[in-house]
Image: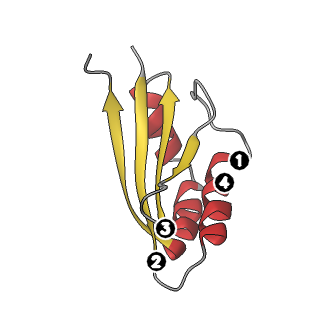
Amino acid sequence: MSFFSAGDWTIREGHLERDFVQAWLASVDMDPPINGLRVRPRLLRDLDRPGHFLSFAEWESREAIDGFRTRPDFASVIGAIREHAEFVIYTLDEAA
């Protein structure tokens, strides 16, 4: 079974997409590396809604997702993203 995380991101008014993308990439390129990822997380730009992005990642387990979100450095990287975007993060598994 696979587990997934997904994010729905909207750039804050007055902020630049490139600053958000840099902050999001910092959350992916952490040191030490993120454990439990099956593939590198992806960030997708909505072509119909400027300033709107979706992201997704596939994980080995729910525990791996929880482990990432409880890392000591998670709060600082998510805080850097929050500076540039409003967002909702989802934890998912396959339904079909």
Image quadrant where one finds the C terminus:
top left
Going 70% across and 39% down the picture, which residue do you hit? 33
Q: In the image, is 94 to the left or to the right of 60?
A: left
Are the two marked residues, 1 and 4, in contact with CB atoms closer than 8 angstroms? yes
Are the two marked residues, 2 and 4, in contact with CB atoms closer than 8 angstroms? no
Q: Is residue 20 above or below residue 95?
A: below
**Circle 3 residues within 10 Å: few <14, some 14–19, many ≥20:** some
Question: Which-is-in-front pick, marks 3 and 2?
Answer: 3
Q: Earlier in the sequence, mark 2 or mark 1?
A: 2
Query: Which type of secondary structure does the marked residue at label 4 adopt?
Result: helix
Of residues 47 and 64, the one nearer the viewer is 47
Q: Earlier in the sequence, mark 3 or mark 2?
A: 2
Question: Which x, y percent locates residue 95?
Answer: 25, 21
The residue to which callout 2 is attached is 12
Query: Which type of secondary structure does the marked residue at label 2 adopt?
Result: loop
Q: CA distance from mark 3 to mark 1?
A: 22 Å
Of residues 12 and 83, the one nearer the viewer is 12
Question: Which x, y percent locates residue 73?
Answer: 60, 56
Query: Which type of secondary structure does the marked residue at label 1 adopt?
Result: loop
Question: Which x, y percent locates residue 65?
Answer: 46, 36
**Circle 2 residues within 10 Å: few <14, some 14–19, many ≥20:** some
Are the two marked residues, 4 and 3, in contact with CB atoms closer than 8 angstroms? no
Q: In the image, is 41 to the left or to the right of 92?
A: right
Going 57% across and 41% down the picture, which residue do you hit? 42
Q: Which circle marks residue 51 in the picture?
A: 3
Q: Which circle marks residue 25 in the picture?
A: 4
Q: Is residue 43 above or below residue 35?
A: below
**Circle 1 residues within 10 Å: few <14, some 14–19, many ≥20:** few
The residue to which callout 1 is attached is 29
Question: Which x, y percent locates residue 38?
Answer: 58, 24
Q: CA distance from mark 2 to mark 1?
A: 23 Å
Q: CA distance from mark 4 to mark 3?
A: 16 Å
